[in-house]
Amino acid sequence: MILTHINYFADLINYFSNTLGWGFGGKILGYVIIALIYMTFFSVAGLLLVYLERRVAAFFQLRLGPNRVGPWGLLQTIADALKLLTKELFGTDRKDNLLYHSAYYIVIIASLMALSAIPFSKGLVAFDVNIGVFFISAISSVGVLSILLGGWGSNNKYSMIGGMRSGLQMISYELSSGLAILTIVLMAGTLSMTGIVEQQRDMIFLLKGHIPALIAFIIFVIAGTAESNRTPFDLPEGEAELGAGYHTEYSGMGFAWFFLAEFINMFIISAVGVTLFFGGWLAPFGITDGLGPEWAWGLFWFFLKVFLMIFLLMWFRWTFPRLRIDQLLTLEWKYLLPIGLLNIIIMAVFVYFGLIL
Amino acid sequence: MEQVTLNTADLKSQEYFLNMGPQHPATHGVLRLILTLDGEVVKNIEPDLGYIHRSIEKQCEYEGYKQIIHLTDRMDYLSAHINNEAVALAIEQALEIEVPERVKVIRTIMGELTRIASHLLWWGVMGMDVGALTTFMYAFRDREMINDIMEETCGARLTMSYSTPGGVMFDLHPNFQKRVKEFIPHLRKVIPKYDELLTGNVIFQKRMKGVGYLSKEDAISLGASGPVARGSGVHSDIRKIKPYSALDKVDFKEIIYTEGDNLARYKVRMDEMLESLNIIEQLIDNIPDDGIQAKTKALIKLPKGEFLQRVETARGDLGVYIVSDGKKNPYRVKFRSPGFSNLNALIEMGKGHLIADLVAIMSTLDFVVPDIDR
Amino acid sequence: MNTETIQNKLAGIFPELQFSEEASQFLNIIVSKDDYIKLAETLKNEGFDYLFSMTGMDWGKELGVTLHLERTEDRFMIVVKVMLEDRENPELPTLENIWKTAHLHEREIYDLFGINFKGHSVMKRLLLSEDWEGYPMRKDWMDPSKMIIR
Amino acid sequence: MSYIGDIIGGIKTLLNGMKVTGAYFFPNIINRKYVITRQYPDEPAIVFERFKGEVVMWHNENNEHRCTGCQACEIACPNGSIEIIWDRVLNPETGKKVKQIDQHIYHLGMCTMCNLCIQACPTNAIMWSTNFHNSTYDRSQLTKVLNRPGSKLMAGVEE
């Protein structure tokens, strides 16, 4: 299938290097600008998500949440970030300095890389590869490395238990989320994120693939929650059991990076879910087609869908109790994985006989 | 060729120590448990107490009998009124005073309200311990209503010092009955919701069922009391065994579950809240009107002898054991606190479970650390 | 079970026991140090399976322990007292193996009264720190810097 | 078949739980219907009339109090948080020496709000105030003198 590739980021680099004739230097400038855009997005989205989480949690818990700093308390998380920036960084005495400090760089790098492959709107994807889905799921498993390193390097038993739990959990649930993604890939016939979105022009995959797609979606949500370490799968943190788990010994910005990355991971999981199942940045039933620039409407629809998905994850978090480590594994290996495998076979049969809508 | 055999008995992982507490979210205060762990499996538990030890028993030896009462507030602060009542009853028993009926009824209603408040707090924290954070605020909303009732009548929300030897400090506030009658239907309405939210939840059920088993024999031998013992099928409600205050006039069920696991203890407390509402409902409409204070001397001196009064606090069997030598100060006061004995049960139950289960078990034992340390 | 049956039964086994019901609601049994563990075993077999509380006592001259024992079957309670003349080195056998609840109670008594329970699995300070001197619940324990006596 | 039954039953209980929290969340978004917290400095705290905040001494408009200096409260206090400094002053009318308080010192930091002093007071000189703004930067500020400077015993209290 031939897709008309529009990519505004590529255009930008092209503009600097070729139109302005700055050559290699222009290319570098373009990359830097794109990187800055993504890093700004990383921090702003992270802070907004933290604010949103606190506000949503408050409404679930009969409270008001942050409402003092700025209008509706919107600047609360920025104030918190400033506070964390100015805090002293202190850790345990005998920490492994290299591992301890590299942990939060890895977590940022992994989240930013995964972010780069997500199509925010028509033509707004920094790293548009033909194996986008594959790339994201590969990169998101690098994130576990940071948690393991943080847990090990802190030289704290609670951190270590948290890190080990996290490794166990991430590696197990990677399988299920991968299978859920593959189910959709079977239907789409492409691994490219933009390709998958374009395929859903007529109907979103959740409806197109009906039963197998719905099962895949449920599996994806469960596995995604587990991968982003959120309740009911927040065992690596498990504040009632482990204090704060793997980031117990981090203070100031070290902690803040983990914290932001956790929320960005949630965003990535939701974004992937939206792209795979709900047609990404496409307007539902094409209701805004031709009303204005497609990329602007795309951004709107994309973020609306992602917000709804994130809200679902938050709803989970503020309702459910936490699982135990053995139950976590039972859920994965005895329920999600067999069902996922069966589901992929069913989907293959459906696709082969053209039973999908 | 050399045969390599692997003897599984030789495969050993290194055991290590983990300090749980004194500052740990799950120990609800300053309890310190020294855990021996193998991976995440708890091999041994050794409690280390005393981080909030104020030597109340020693202090009592230097205080007058009236002055003991405010100290007991600070033991098990969640059932402060029942503690006050225990000391007041022990002193009344020694002096052989008959308190007015009104006092008895007021004490019983207050005691049951305290019990509900304590169980509600426990329910909220129980949810937190297993990871459901929202339960805490829901429980606090309802508990706040009880606290308001308490504050209106006793002048304090938690440490009421409401009972005195021979009576109570203040008469009931005119709003008391109205507020209690508002509270009863409210709690009746929300508890089924809470059951849907937490009790019925499949994750919660899996976390609770069959975890932390305590057999009936062990429960007795370990000195467990209150909901912990009743969850194991031990008939141990002092309100039934030796009714005090107005409890002999009301009709209520002793909640007993025989499974002996976390879920049984959980259900005992949930049902007990409703049963306490029953008790209050029976008493609230006809509070007799015959004064709030029996005649006592300004300086109370107990006759020579030993006096034991047992009451059922929210945590279990509280015993106040006063040895008097006839002077104005007691010779020896012992508070047999339920939490201290229940801690024995934790040592026994926690072995062989994962840390997460240990936290859940600790939660169902419902510790209040000042009650353990005294 | 009532007071007489248990009194007669025990008097048959232990001729040296002293019984009194004076100034107490329960039957008080005063036992010597030597018969202590045997009496405990006998009582356990009699159905006194619930060790309600273990109270360390300082009677001025003697140290001792007061046990409140209860039958869960009919909720009949008796009090057992054991007195130790030796204030320097008081020792008692442990009840840990008879009633498991004695585990922590005995540690507490050791901590506050200094009675050493022989055979106890963890005979360490429970409430106070390891370097604490003296046994604060004894009547002769004084610490002017920590106590204000009116 | 119980395998699939378990899954469906489990998901059902999870949805039940979400229903309960959702029933609180959505009204809260619209009109804060179930919000129970109060915005404290903006909204005043609810304090009941019997609230035991701190012990105060009642004074009338002529700066007179009712404390005779009998020290009943000092004896009744379990924590030693009340100290009364008193003196014997010659009453010019009757020519007799009368006990008069100099300072009624109250250590708020040691008070456990047990009500025993107020119960013990024979002349109703001291009472509870509902003030709960008791935090200070220095512990010594918690020691208060309850009788105002220059205050006198109200006439007629002695009898």
Image: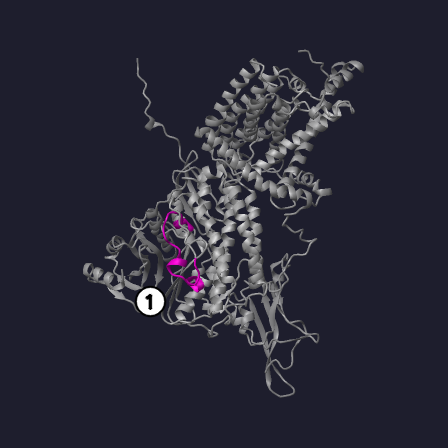
Q: Residue A75: x, y in percent?
A: 71, 40
Q: Residue A110: x, y in percent?
A: 61, 25
Colouring chosen for the image of the structure = one colour
Q: Is B42 inside the magenta-drawn segment?
A: no
Q: Quadrant of the C terminus of chain B?
A: bottom left
- Report the amino acid beneath label 1: Ser
In the figure, is residue A130 to the left or right of C20? right
Picture quadrant of residue A132: top right
Does any portion of residue B52 appear in the rendered image? no
Picture quadrant of residue A292: top right
Q: Is B243 inside the magenta-drawn segment?
A: yes
Q: Quadrant of the N terminus of chain B?
A: top left
Does any portion of residue A53 appear in the rendered image? yes
Magenta-highlighted residues: B227-251
Q: Chain of mark 1?
A: C
Query: Which residue appears at 55% of the width and 22% of the height?
Result: A212
Residue A269, placed above or below residue A82: above
Residue B266, placed above or below residue D44: above
Picture quadrant of residue A26: top right
C94 or C136: nearer the viewer = C94
A226 or A291: nearer the viewer = A291
Q: Which residue is mark 1?
A: C24
Q: Residue B293: x, y in percent?
A: 49, 71
Q: Residue B224: x, y in percent?
A: 38, 51
Q: Residues within 10 Å of mark 1 (few under 14, many from 20)?
A: some
Query: Which residue appears at 46% of the width and 75% of the height?
Result: B297
SS under mark 1: loop
Return the residue found at the far right: A20
C90 or C98: nearer the viewer = C98
Query: Which residue appears at 48% of the width and 52% of the height?
Result: B274
